[in-house]
Amino acid sequence: MAVTLTKENFSKSIESGVALVDFWAPWCGPCKMQLPIVEELSTELQGQATIGKINVDEEPELASQFGVMSIPTLILFKDGQPVDKMVGLQSKDALKTKIKGQA
């Protein structure tokens, strides 16, 4: 399962290694298509990367901190620093390739 991130656990969750964070909302159609892909990646890449999700309605500060204007937005972090930002629905293969490129 992808980790549900909040402002309380965000920094600790992404501070070391590779992390992919999905910014989403329950009312967003493309987000509902992205979420199962994110969940599959969290299972497949367990131990290799942290896969997290942030509900932008519940965590607006985090969304604004990373300039999330439209969702889904996926941000790839390496050791706590953002290294890639993807807006819109992403394929599992594309995400996996980007994650493995940072690992």
Image (cartoon, grey):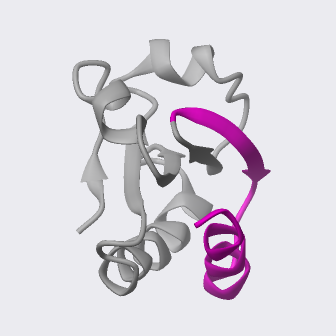
Residue range highlighted in magenta: 80-103
How far across and how far down the image is residue 87, in percent?
76, 50
Q: Quadrant of residue 69?
A: top right
Question: At which x and y percent is residue 89?
Answer: 70, 66
5 displayed left or right of 101: left
- The x and y percentages for residue 33 are 53, 73
Q: Is residue 94 left or right of residue 3?
A: right
Instruction: Specify the quadrant of the image occupied by residue 81.
Output: top right
Q: Is residue 72 magenta?
A: no
From the viewer's side, name the closer residue of 91 and 43: 43
Left or right of 97? Residue 55 is: left
- x, y percent for residue 35: 44, 67
Q: Is residue 44 above or below residue 34?
A: below
Residue 81: say if magenta. Answer: yes
Q: Nearer the viewer, residue 9 or 32?
A: 9
Image quarter of the C terminus: bottom right
Q: Is 25 placed above or below 81 here?
A: below
33 lies above or below 67: below
Position of the N terminus, as image quadrant, is: bottom left
* Residue in the image at 66% along x and 36% along y: 82
Kindly identify the residue that appears in the image at 59 percent across and 44 percent down.
77
